[in-house]
Structures are given as structure tokens and as C-alpha cells.
Image (spheres, rainbow, N blue to C red):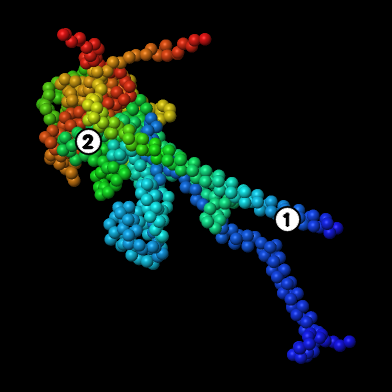
Amino acid sequence: MTRLSVLLLMAVVVSALALVHSQYESRRLFMAIEAEGKEATRLEVDFDRLQVERRAQATPLRVEQIARQQLQMRMVNPGITQYVNTPQAKAKPEVNP
Amino acid sequence: MSRSVQLGSSPLLASKTPVWRSKMIVAAVAVGFMGLIGRAAYVQVIRNDFFKRQGEVRFARTLVLPASRGRVLDRNGMLLASSVPAPSIWANPEDMERDPVKLRQLAKLLEMNPAELEKKLENEDKTFVWLRRQMDESRVKEIQALDIKGVYSIKEYKRLYPEGEAAAHIVGFTNVEDQGQEGVELVFQKQLSGKAGSRRVIKDRLGRVVEAVGDAVPPEDGQDIQLSIDSKIQFFAYQKLRDAVQENKAKAGSVVVLDAQSGEVLALANYPSYSPDRRVNLSGEQLRNRALTDTFEPGSTMKPFAVALALEKGLVKPETPVQTAPGRITITGSTITDAHPHGVLTVNEVIQKSSNVGTVKLAMQIEPREMWEMYSAVGFGQKPQVPFPGVVSGRLRPYKTWRPVEQATMSYGYGLSVSLLQMARAYTVFARDGVVVPATLLKAEQQVPGVRVFSANNAQAMRKMLNMVTGPGGTAPKAQTMGYSVGGKTGTAHKQEGKGYAGHKYRGVFVGLAPIEAPRVVVAVMIDEPSNGRYFGGDVAAPVFSTTVQQTLRLLGIQPDLSVKPQVVAKAVEESF
């Protein structure tokens, strides 16, 4: 009887310790996933910001200024444009077997 | 047996104690324990939810998951407005560390002088003071590196507008709280803003999140809004307009570019404009979206409608002669004159030379009701179905109150008022062979059915007349553009001031379409109070039309319909040695 009690007591203690450990482990992992989630959001926001920055570098105003002033380019007009017509009917590419 | 306990050998303790005393102590201790057990049961079992909640209050926190504001895109998916993080810095003056060296560094990073910062932190009773809102992220990191106690940063977002002033009136802007204030940002505030979510978490002593409680409510991000605007066309239209307003020393100007087939607004620009990123000392003049919110008497740009109705009623044919000599006509006591008297003109030439007398003669044969119905059908006096703050419907009085002379003046554009967008939209009736479509600011997913106002034949006849306006002998040869046939109508209206007309204040207008055989775009230009000598619509507004049409058709990839002398050097001549 006493031996059984001691055995059960030990089992209870071991399971309690296991519980504490797994709780600790779960919190640790949770924190890790949380940190990763934060990093993901940060990267997403960064991506948005970079997109805006790229756009700001390529606004028509800036492109026009650089083309005109630095590259000495001028506006195209129909006089210096060669128009090439692609027949609509033949638009399907021929597939080689 | 004695009824007492011998407690010791000391004579002090030798006195006899009655047994009930020790029993009473045992009982008291037992009662104490019972109390504790009762309390424990109460805490653990009976009222345990209350204590659980109290515990949670102390370590569980509700975190707000902010929704990001949707972006505003142009028709090709280019960004017109987007949010980027811009943290704000705040301080708690009550428990702030006041190290003069650090404060000076802080002031420098905040871009304010130390005295200014001192003033903000003066009141030590306060627990919250904004130091600077929406700063650069890198700057904020430097401030955090200073590690001043009582100075904190909070995550906020800032709106960026890469197109700047070119699209300012369309896109609008938000305030520092991310609420739309103007333009699309205001109109679509609900769709753009989204809905913040939330989640419950448990934080440990160090403030780290260690566990989630229950289910999180995920944030609903704001939707992206895709406009019908093409940012390149918008930029060119704005640029040409700005140049024209400055060159003509005008007060203001507007330009509207419509896709003639779908009614989509490809560009809508006003000058003066503003930069939505740096809004300091903004005036109403700069903020106003004139093309939508200002109405004006359109002058001669109205003539094609009355004349087209006369064709539609079968009253005249394009070649029918109309006597306009001696350049005057009197209607119920009021005299209407032509600026340049002409003799007999065909209906074609009435439009080409913009004769008031000729137009009035045709218009007076039409019933007022029919004229009113046609004007309403093309949208005059009707609120455009464009969701925008301050869109006006213009003024078109009910036909029952028209006096004959008013019907006459309306036929050439006085006595009624329209906005530039209404004017552009009305011209789609000629571009689409007599069918008018509503204008839209959002990218159209499918074709909208239009309303037939004129027959296809009459609309085509009117296009021919509009084409003649830009040809030799017309009022707007400056509207011509290389490679593309164009057509349109000039308008030069006296500005109304108070009750009468201002002597030397004009508005030059040009509304037209291109290419003439199969129109793809309708462009309307208005220059307000040009004061550099020239003020005719054909002189101040038509050149803007010309360059805008040129760039728009090129960007839309439309092949020229006129033959151009090619300037392409296909093969260079070899240099002789």
C-alpha cells in the first residue's frame, strides 16, 4: 500500500514537472513564432515602402526631366515614328510538335 | 487524577492551568484553519471566475491589429497614393530625464530649436505631449538610440503621393489621423480605411507576448481603389496646362481628358495645384478642383448642340444656307451680334466661323421643350454621376420659364452654366455617333450602355463641322496636331461679375475630339482670365488641346490617321572620303 502511494506520488510529481516544462516550451515557441510574424509584417511594410520609393523615382515628371536635360532626348511624334502593323488574324503562334 | 497539567519545574509555571484553556486554543486554531479552508474553497471553487478575471486583467492585454489603408492606383496599376510607416515621437514631461546635452541632441533630430522643445516640455503636470508626428524611420531610430527616459515612439503611417501636384486634385489627401480630407481619399474613405482587428494575449513581466488567449480578430485591410486615370496622360495634361496658364498669365485653368468610348476620365487636372505631401499655406484657389466644382457660361462651345438638334429635327441640312448678314439679329427687343459679320453661311460654316446670328436663327426654330430635353439628355443641369466632393450640376432653368431671348442666348452658351467635366462628357455624344455615356472616375470593367440623343448620321455631320473649325478658315487652326485629325469648338466667354459681364475678363475654352473618323478621346480645356494679350479660346486653349491630344493618342497606341512626312532617316548617306 505504502509503496503504491509513493509510486503514485512520484508519478504525480513527474507529470507536474512535465507540465511545467511543456508550458515553458510552448511559451518559448510561441514567442519565436511571434517574433517571426513581426519580422514578416516588417518585411511586408518595407516592401510597400520600397515600392513607393521606386515609383517616386520613376514618375513621369522625373523621367521627362532626365530624358530632356541629361540625355538630350526629345518627344516622339508621328513624323519620327515607324508604325508596324501586326495582322490580327495571324496572331496565333504556330506550335512545332 | 488532577484536572491540570504540569508544565514545568519552574515555580512560575507551577501554577495550575485549567485544561479548558488548552482545549480552547486547539479549538481556536481549528476554527482558524476552517476559516482558511473556507476561504480557499471560496477563492478556488465558488468565486473562481472573478479571481481568474482579476488575474487576467493584470497580465492579459488586448492588442489592436491596425488595418493598413488601401492604395490608390491608376488604370495601369501605378501607385497614386500609398501608406508607409512614419513613427511619431511623444514625451511624458512628468517623468522625463532632463539632461541638457541629450535634449539638445533630441531637438536637433526633431528639427526644432532647443527653446521650442523646452516650451513643449514646460508643463510638468502633463503626461503626454507630441514632439513630432510622422517622422522618417531612420530618424526615429537615432532618437531611440539616445535612450532618453520619458521619450517614446508610436507607430503611425504616412500617406505618400508619388505623382505629386499633377494628380493632387483627383487623389486628394488624408490628414495626420489617416482620414481622407479631399478627393478620392475622402470619397472612398470607407473602402480605403479597412477595419482594425484585435487579439488577446498574455504578457510576461518583461512585456513579451507569451500566449494568445482565445481567437484573434484579424484586421481587414482597406481595399485598393483603381481609378480610370492614366498617370502618364495625367502628367502630360497637367504639364501642358500649367505651361499655358503661365504663358497666358491666366488666373487658372483646367483640362479634362475622357476616353470617348467608355466615358472614363483619363486625366483631370487643374492649375494652380498643390503638393499633397507638403501642405503648408494652402489656399482655396489651389485646393479647388475647378473642372468639377466650378461652373461657367460655356459660350460658343454650346453651339454644336443647338445646331445638331436642328439637323436632327430635319430643319436644315449641313449645306443649307443661312443668312447671317448684317451680323445682327433682334429678338424681342434684344440685339445679338457677331464679332465679325459674315454674309450667307452654310450650316457647316456657322459652326466653323462660330456665328452667333446663324446659331440663333437655327435655334429659334426649335421648341424650347425639345431644346431643354436635349440639353438634359447630354447632362447639362444634371449632377454628373462622379462620386466626388463638391460636384456641381450647373444651371439649366426649366424650359417653361425661358423667354425667347433666353432660348436664343442659351443656344450660343449664355444664360446657363456647366462644369468642364459636363462639357467634355456632353461631347462624347458626337464622338460616339450620337450616344452619350456617363463619365466615370473608376476603371470601367464593362461597357456602359449609353443614351441615344442624335442619329449617327447627324453626329458624323457635326464631327465634320467640328473638323472644319480646326481647318483653314476655322476659329481654331492651332488645335491641329501632327498625324491626327481633330475636331472641336472654341469658346470665348465674358466672365460674369455680379449682375453684369466683366468688360475685359474672359474665359477661353476649347472642347474637341480626335481622331475625327473614329474618336478615341474627348479633351476639354479651359483657361480662366488669360491676360497676356490673347484671350480667344482658339489662341489660349486650343494649343493645350493640340499637345494633350498628341501625347494621349501616342500613349494609347493609336496610329495616326493623317499621312505625315516621315522624318525618319532610314539609311544614312555614306560620307565621301
The residue at 65%/51% (across/down) is A21
**Going by the picture, which residue comes out furthest to the front?**
B9
**What's the amino acid at mark 2?**
Arg
Q: Where is residue A89 shown, x and y percent of the image?
A: 42, 12
Quarter holding the N terminus of chain B?
bottom right
- Which circle marks residue A13 in the picture? 1
Residue B211 relative to residue B192: left or right: right
Q: Where is residue A67 shown, x and y percent of the image?
A: 26, 28
Q: Where is residue A58 shown, x and y percent of the image?
A: 32, 33
- Which circle marks residue B70 in the picture? none
Quarter holding the C terminus of chain B?
top left
Helix, strand or loop at label 1? It is helix
Residue B62 relative to residue B363: left or right: right
Helix, strand or loop at label 2? It is helix
- Say which residue label 2 marks: B242
Q: Quadrant of residue B448?
A: top left
Q: Quadrant of residue B74?
A: top left
